[in-house]
Image (tube, helix red, strand yellow):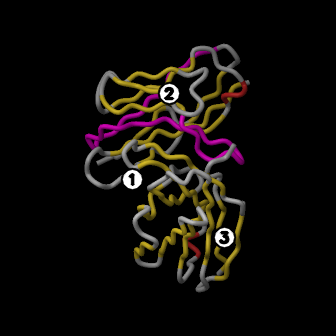
C-alpha cells in the first residue's frame, strides 16, 4: 500500500496563477483533510471531507477550493495564487468508526508563490 | 488565539535520558489528544493518543500524560535515542468530529 500520496512535491507559481494539488489514498478512508504548515504556526486545517461528494471549511479556507469526486481522491485548488499562500501543504486521511482517530499524512507539497 | 500551545520551540536531551514535551490547551471540552512526530521533508506520523477518560497511555518508550484540571498534556520518551530527533506536534479535538487543532511543534534534538 502506498498510503497517502501527494502530487506534485514542489511547485513555484507566479501571483495570479492557478493550480490543483492532488491527494490520493489507498486505505479506503472516509475522511480526508488538507492542511498547511507555516513556520511558527503548526498545522492549520484548510478544508476537509467526511465522504465522497462532501466538503467542509476548516480554519483557513479563504483562497482555496476543494473537491472529492472519488472516495480515494481529494483535490485542493488555488484559483488565483497569492504570496501568502506560500507554504507546505499536507493531505491526510482517516477511517470512520474504528475507534482509532489517527490521521495518516502524505509527504507534503512545497508551494512557493512569487 | 491558539487553542493548543507548545511553548517550547526546541529541546535538547542527552541520549538515554528522558525527554519531556509539553502541550497546553484552552478548550476544556476537548476529549481526544494525539502526538505526531515529523522528520524533515516528510509528513507527520502518528505516535500515541489519549482519550479524556484516561490520564495516562503507554506505548513502548512513549508515554502520554493528561492533566484535565490543568488542561495540560505531556509526552515522555524514555530512553531517548538519536532517531527520536524530530519535530513533535500535539493535537487536540473532539473524537466525534475527527477534526483536530494542532500545536506549533517542539523540535527535539537527542544528542549522542
Residue annotated with mark 3? B109
| Residue name at image x 60 percent, y 56 percent | B25
Residue A99 is covered by the magenta coloring: no
The residue most toward the bottom is B16
| Residue name at image x 50 percent, y 32 percent | A8
Looking at the image, is mark 2 or mark 3 nearer the viewer? Answer: 2
Estimate the x, y position of residue B51 in percent, counting from the top left: 41, 61
Residue A16 shows which numbered tag? Answer: none
Q: Residues within 10 Å of mark 1 (few under 14, many from 20)?
A: many
Q: Tell me whether circle 2 and circle 3 mark residues in contact (CB < 8 Å).
A: no
Estimate the x, y position of residue B12 in percent, counting from the top left: 70, 73
Q: Which residues are magenta?
A: A17-45
Letter of the chain that mark 3 sits on in the rendering: B
Residue A32 is covered by the magenta coloring: yes
Looking at the image, is mark 3 or mark 1 nearer the viewer? Answer: 1
Quadrant location of the C terminus of chain A in the rendered image: top right
Above or below for B108 versus A97: below
The answer to whether tags 2 and 3 share a subunit is: no
Instruction: Describe residue B81's horizontal placement relative to residue A66 as left or right.
Output: right
Estimate the x, y position of residue B37 in percent, counting from the top left: 53, 60
Letter of the chain that mark 2 sits on in the rendering: A
Above or below for B83 versus A52: below
Front-most of residues B68 and B79: B68
Amino acid at each position: 500500500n502506498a498510503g497517502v500520496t501527494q502530487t506534485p512535491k514542489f511547485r513555484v507559481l507566479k501571483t495570479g496563477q492557478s493550480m490543483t494539488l492532488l491527494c490520493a489514498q489507498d486505505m479506503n478512508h472516509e475522511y480526508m483533510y488538507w492542511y498547511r504548515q507555516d513556520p511558527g504556526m503548526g498545522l492549520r486545517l484548510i478544508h476537509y471531507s467526511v465522504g465522497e461528494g462532501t466538503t467542509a471549511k476548516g480554519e483557513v479556507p479563504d483562497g482555496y477550493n476543494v473537491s472529492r469526486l472519488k472516495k480515494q481522491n481529494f483535490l485542493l485548488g488555488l484559483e488565483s495564487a497569492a504570496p501568502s499562500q506560500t507554504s507546505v501543504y499536507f493531505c491526510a486521511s482517516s477511517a470512520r468508526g474504528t475507534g482509532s482517530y489517527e490521521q495518516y499524512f502524505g509527504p507534503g507539497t512545497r508551494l512557493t508563490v512569487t | 488565539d491558539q487553542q493548543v500551545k507548545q511553548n517550547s520551540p526546541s529541546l535538547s536531551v542527552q541520549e538515554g535520558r528522558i525527554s519531556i514535551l509539553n502541550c497546553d490547551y484552552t478548550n476544556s471540552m476537548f476529549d481526544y489528544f494525539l502526538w505526531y512526530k515529523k522528520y524533515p521533508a516528510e509528513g507527520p506520523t502518528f505516535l500515541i493518543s489519549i482519550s479524556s477518560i484516561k490520564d495516562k497511555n503507554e506505548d513502548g518508550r512513549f508515554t502520554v500524560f493528561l492533566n484535565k484540571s490543568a488542561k495540560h498534556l505531556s509526552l515522555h520518551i524514555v530512553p531517548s535515542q538519536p532517531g527520536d530527533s524530530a519535530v513533535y506536534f500535539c493535537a487536540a479535538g473532539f473524537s466525534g468530529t475527527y477534526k483536530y487543532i494542532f500545536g506549533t511543534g517542539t523540535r527535539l534534538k537527542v544528542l549522542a
